[in-house]
Image: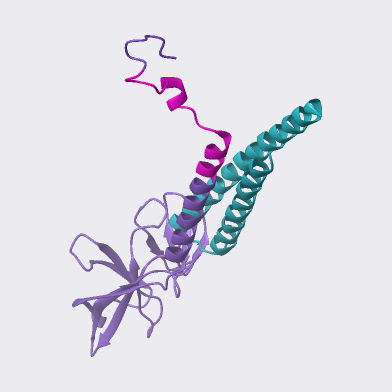
Amino acid sequence: MNTDPNTQNDFPVDWEEDHYVSRREFFKFLTLAGGGLAVGTVGISTLANRPKSELRFQPALIASIKDLKPGESLSFGFPRENDMCILIRPTESEFFAYKQRCTHLSCPVEWRPDQGRLYCPCHNGAFAIKTGKVLQGPPPRPLPKIMIERRGDEIWAVGIREGEEA
Amino acid sequence: MKRTLQLRRQQKSVVVVGLILFGLVLFILQLWLFVTTLEEAIAGHHRASWATTAASILLVGVDYWMLRGIYRLDRSA
């Protein structure tokens, strides 16, 4: 409390009183903060539930069909040279392409023809060859799929589709 | 009479403190729901997100209801 008579009129508000927060004000603040958290939760849920995106890029030639025998795979860069992807030909007529980075800690996944799945050697993660879905291990979500087109004897990459929930 | 009023005021004070403590618990719950939703979203899951959102909105509703209760208590004092 300001007890100096010379300044009491100039500074009538007590410092401690000025910083006093009533229980009502505190609860109001708590409710507002809770409201903020609820709005944030709604926003995150909306973002998490948005439709999975398909990104189209400039088509890029991956390989000729003759270069890839059934049961084999090859690595390629798409959409940029350094974005490693993997093209797999499990059977004579089927082709699948995925991003080669594991969705766990970005280790490169490899094609295991004997098991018919993509395998991450870092933490024993595995992905289904047809869908890219997680079959085992710690990866939290499927591998992003590379959209491919067959043009004559050639396989072209045209876009990327985010993986659906694991 | 004066003694009764004083007792009533003390009771109200206890109720307000109780409401504030309960409000704090609800706030911590909301914080946990927010973090859980965020973690799930980052991990690419969205199964639980609407449930956590509904729970969070419900908790804000309870908070607001209690805040109105505190104001009502003040007015009746």
Residue positioned 21% across, 68% down in the render: A79
Q: Decide if residue A46 is on the left or right side of residue B24.
A: left
Residue positioned 59% across, 52% down in the render: B64
Closer to us: A124 or A70: A124
Closer to us: B28 or A107: B28
Give the percent coordinates (x, y) of residue A83. 24, 61
Q: In this view, does B44 lie above or below B66?
A: below
Region rendered in magenta? A9-30
Q: Is residue A23 above or below residue A65?
A: above
Q: Is residue A59 above or below residue B69?
A: below
| Residue A138 appears in the picture as rendered | no
Q: In this view, does A81 lie above or below A123?
A: below
Closer to us: A13 or A24: A13
Give the percent coordinates (x, y) of residue A166. 50, 64
Image colour for chain B is cyan
Closer to us: B73 or A73: B73
Q: Decide if residue A13 is on the left or right side of residue A26.
A: left
Image colour for chain A is purple
Residue found at the far bottom of this picture: A152
Residue positioned 37% across, 9% down in the render: A4
| Residue B65 appears in the picture as rendered | yes
Q: Decide if residue A84 is on the left or right side of residue A88.
A: left
Give the percent coordinates (x, y) of residue A29. 50, 42
Q: Is residue A158 magenta?
A: no
Residue positioned 37% across, 85% down in the render: A93
Give the percent coordinates (x, y) of residue A12. 39, 21
- Looking at the rendering, in which quadrant would you find the N terminus of chain A? top left
